[in-house]
Amino acid sequence: MRILVVEDELPICEDIAQALRHAGYVVDCLHDGEEADFRGFSEDYDAVVLDLGLPKLDGLSVLRNWRREGRNFPVLILTARGSWQDKVAGMDAGADDYLAKPFEMEELLARIRALIRRSLGHADSMISCGRLQVDTKAARVLLDARPLELSPLEYRLLNYLVHRCGEVVSRTELMEHIYDGEAERSINALDVLVARLRRKLGAEVLHTRRGQGYFIEPLNEGA
C-alpha cells in the first residue's frame, strides 16, 4: 500500500512516515500544498495524510481540487485547529476522516487501516481471500489459519492482493504500490518475489493471468 503524507513540519512528517513504513506501507513525503496538488493527480495512492496548514497552497484547497477532478483516494486530514468549524470544513471539502494535533501514532495507524479497508469494501481488520487471511492490525498473513513467515516485501504484496480479492492486478500497479524506491522496481524483481512466495504458499494460491497480472481467487462457497 502506498501512502502520501503531506506535512510541512518535517519532524512530524518523518515520525508519521517512519511509523507507516514500520507498519508495512510504502510512503511518499511532501511538505507544501502545490507539490501535493500535482502529485495527487499524477500518482495513485491508497490513502493520503494531509495537513491543512500548508505553505504555498492550503490543504483544504488541495483537497477540493482533487475531489473536483474525481481523485477519490481516502484522505485523513491533520489539523492543529481545534474548532468544530475547521473539522466540518475539512469533511465538506471531501475528507474521509480527521485527526487533531497532537495525536497518538497508534490512532493514526488505526484510522489509516480503516480508511483503506472501507475504500475497498472491507469492514473488519481481518481480511480473507481464498485460503489467505491478512490481519491488518498485526501486519501478518495466515494460510489456512496458520501464520506465515514473510519478509516485509512479501507481506506488502500479499496484503495488496488480498485487499483486492479476486481482482487481477497488473505488474506495473504492484510495483508502484509495494516497492519503496525507484531502484527496486523491475519486472524481474517482481517475478522473483512472486516465485519465492509461491514456494511458501504452495500450489494454486497466487495465480497468474498471462499478460495481465496476478490475483488471489476467492473460495468458491458453492463448491
Image: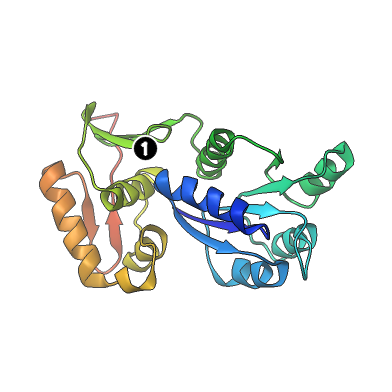
Q: Residue furthest top?
A: 145
159 versus 193 height, above or below: above
Looking at the rendered image, the quarter that the C terminus falls into is top left
187 versus 192 height, above or below: below
| In this rendering, position of residue 106 left or right of residue 98 | left
Give the tally of numbered discs.
Answer: 1
User: Would you call the spot at circle 1 few (<14 residues within 10 Å), some (14-19), or many (20 or more)?
Assistant: some
Read off the residue under disc 1: 139
Secondary structure type for disc 1: loop
- Towards the viewer: 110 or 206: 110
The location of residue 28, given as percent across then percent down, is 51, 62
Q: Quadrant of residue 54?
A: bottom right
Q: Is residue 138 visible?
A: yes
| In this rendering, position of residue 45 left or right of residue 153 | right
Q: Who's the residue at 86% across and 37% down the image? A: 84
49 versus 134 height, above or below: below
| In this rendering, position of residue 81 left or right of residue 148 | right
Going by the numbered disc 1, the residue's amino acid type is: Ala
Colouring rule applied to residues: rainbow
Q: Residue furthest front?
A: 11
| In this rendering, position of residue 24 left or right of residue 40 | left
The location of residue 178, given as percent across then percent down, is 37, 58
The location of residue 132, given as percent across then percent down, is 27, 36
36 versus 166 height, above or below: below
Q: Who's the residue at 67% across and 54% down the image? A: 50
- Towards the viewer: 173 or 84: 84
The location of residue 134, given as percent across then percent down, is 34, 36
Q: Who's the residue at 55% across and 44% down the image? A: 119
Q: Who's the residue at 65% across and 37% down the image? A: 103
Q: Is residue 73 visible?
A: no
